[in-house]
Amino acid sequence: MKRFFLSSAMFVCFVALASTSLAGTYSDRVISLNPTYYYQLNETDTSAGVVDTMGNGPVGSYNGDYEDGVPEVGIPGPDFLIEGGRWTVSEEWDDLGDEIDIIGLDSDNVAHASNNEGHITLGDGEAFASNSISVAMFALGGKAQGGDRLFTNNVEDPLTSFQIVVGNDGIVVSTNPTVGCFDEVECGHRSLFFPDEGIEFTNQGADRGLNGAENGWWHIVATTEGDTALDRTENIRLWLNGVDRTEDMLPGTVGWGTNTGLAKIGGRRANAADTTTHSGAQDEVSIWLDRVLSDEEALSLYEAAISDEPIGAPGDFDGDGQLTALDIDLLSDAVLAGDNKSQFDLNSDSLVNQSDREVWVDDLKSTYFGDSNLDGEFNSTDFVAVFTEGKYEDGVAANAGWASGDWNGDKEFDSSDFVAAFVAGGYEIGPRQVAVVPEPSALVLFAIGLLVCLARRR
């Protein structure tokens, strides 16, 4: 059995949602995609449980005897993987591809090792279940014994169940534990079978290394969605080490059951030493409920894992490392487009609308509607700035942006922008962190007076 030992370096976790983080580029990228839960597994002892970085989920607990060193916390984190590949004719059976260093995680990053005898219980499986779901994680192999669970919400309902399993001599994504696998229609999962030597289509890539630690870590992204149980199975998607392997996945031969009703990492049953406990290790488990990651988003996670280039903060849509008027204008354009592109979905509700603009202004930029120069305050200098631009009711369609007075996001600067700004509050009360909100009546009277003055000027 592959064994691990505690890293000598202590991991210090720091997350900054509104600026570029000091953490590795991988965690920055995960956070920028607003997962529902993000269990980084950076704990170096078991006393405080397993913490969700996003602050949304319950504190997970450890199951197993972690005192004698069989299951372990604080093992060295992912260090390398083997380049991904698709099924193709391979001239040499041992043609596994090149090793790639995982440099997008901090050098002192740590992980959790189940080692066949320990797993993590996250909590009630229903809190980790949804019709549409995405899970991303790193996994390090040992040989599977009986369908090792990398992640399971342990929910039986085929409209919300989701499991990532090492089994069928490969990897399995299961969405329906209520059926076996008699044919493609009656099969509640898809398997990426790893072929044996001599099969015509051997894999030129890392597939055969999944069940062995000597071939490095795996970066896994698995998703599904659908209105019926069959749809959810047919819509299973899988990316391994940056390669979309969905077309290589086939119906299996058995079903993959659930147990306990508790969501888990690295196991399935209450008994930590059960055969379905993972024989390897896991790290950086992120979960999106009611959301399916796009091809670009799934690939971006892999690219962040093998890169040390800084990742922009949430809301930094132009990637310049800052939250500027151009970013809120890009978000406003996305709201008007109505196509709900996920990179603009700042509150993770699968919609792109005014609520996301509120998140950008109130939470990410920590300012107010009306703060045209984005200095953190809404005051008379903002009026000077926007009227200097000269776009107030100028008769030119769709020519205004945030800096020129379009605070409600309709690409015009008119009286409706003042209404939006004053209804939101914030005029001359200082920076948001120390602001004291004035009486609403005073704001309304000021707004009415300002609009009257503007009308007279015209």
Image: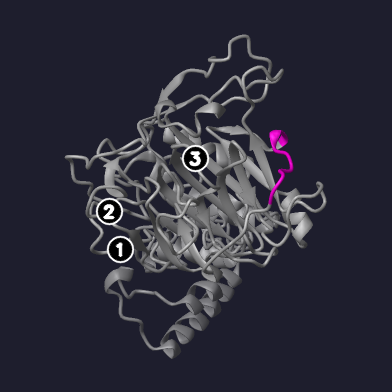
Mark before the other along the chain sequence, 3 or 2: 2
Is residue 110 toward the left or the right of residue 131 in the image? left
Query: Residue at the location (45% across, 82% down)?
Result: 446
Mark before the other along the chain sequence, 3 or 1: 1
Q: Quadrant of the N terminus?
A: top left
Q: Mark 1: give few (<14), some (14-19) or many (20+) Cα within 10 Å.
A: some
Is residue 114 toward the left or the right of residue 34 in the image? left
Name the main secondary structure of what is drawn in magenta. Answer: loop
Q: Amino acid at mark 3?
A: Leu
Gap between marks 3 and 1, in whole Å?
Answer: 26 Å
Q: Amino acid at mark 2?
A: Glu
Q: Nearer the viewer, mark 3 or mark 2?
A: 2
Front position in the image: 69 or 210: 69
Disc 2 + disc 1, Cβ < 8 Å: yes
> Is 78 contained in the magenta span?
no
Q: Amino acid at mark 1?
A: Gly
Give the residues in magenta: 247-254
**Residue 49 image label:** 1
**Residue 43 image label:** 2
Q: Nearer the viewer, mark 3 or mark 1?
A: 1
